[in-house]
Amino acid sequence: MIKERVKTAQPVVCDAPNEQKYGDSPQGLIKYLIVGIVFGIVFTKAEIISWFRIQEMFRLQSFFMYGVIGSAILVGILSVQLIKRFNIKTIQGEKVVLHDKEFRKGQIIGGFIFGLGWAITGACPGPIFAQIGSGFSVVLVTLLSAIAGTWLYGKFSHKLPN
């Protein structure tokens, strides 16, 4: 009998762990693809992916995007309250665990960098894929930059004020 050597790695500590016990099968992932496609269609039809709409928001020329963002915040607050109040479970029947978050000064810095990138490129992570799917191939630069920024943060997060 051949013994396999198992390389022991440091456990990854996540601020927002996914405590799901049961994973989705490859066929089960299709529901996420469908939701993503619907998400992209809605964003496109509502002009949420429009660079001009985003620029209007940052120039304080239109309330449209603030209304969209405000609506999303209200839906999020309502959803979390309903999950807590009625002990709503996942599709697999698991309990939804919502951990408390602590405030850190790095969130202000990160939010500023995120907003600056959003204002310059006219894209935040959700609409990037809808913009690319709509034929705005220049947004591939934004996508690659977002991936590079995420990688850099992961590489140097232990040295940053987070």
Image (spheres, grey):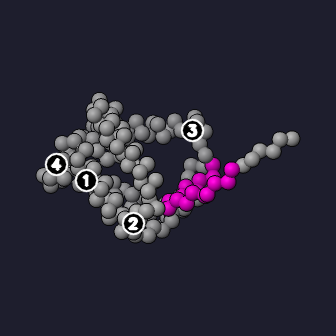
Residue type at tag 3: Gly
Disc 2/disc 4 C-alpha distance (Å) = 32 Å
Q: Secondary structure at mark 1?
A: helix
In the rendered structure, does residue 19 fall within the stretch colored magenta?
yes
Quote the CA–CA distance across marks 3 and 4.
Answer: 39 Å
Q: Residue at x 28, y 59 (%)?
A: 112
The residue that label 2 is drawn on is 161
Q: Which residue is mark 4?
A: 56
Q: CA distance from mark 2 to mark 3?
A: 39 Å
To which residue does mark 3 refer? 28
Q: How far across and down, in percent of the image, does residue 2 sit?
A: 83, 41
Region in magenta? 7-22
Identify which residue, 85 or 30, lies in the foreground. Answer: 30
Q: Using residue 47 as the reference point, say whether residue 94 is left or right of it.
A: right
**Marks 3 and 1: which is nearer the front?**
1
Q: Report whether residue 40 is seen.
A: no
Where does residue 77 sit, x and y in percent of width and height?
39, 61
In the image shown, does 69 or 2 lie closer to the viewer? Answer: 2
Query: Which mark identifies residue 116?
Result: 1
**For the residue carrying disc 1, how many other residues have a C-alpha within 10 Å: few (<14), some (14-19), or many (20+)?**
few
The kind of residue tagged 1 is Leu
Q: Which residue occupies 36% across, 40% down?
A: 144
Q: Classify mark 4: residues with Cα within 10 Å, few (<14), some (14-19) or many (20+).
A: some
Give the CA distance from mark 1 to mark 4: 15 Å
Q: Secondary structure at mark 3?
A: loop
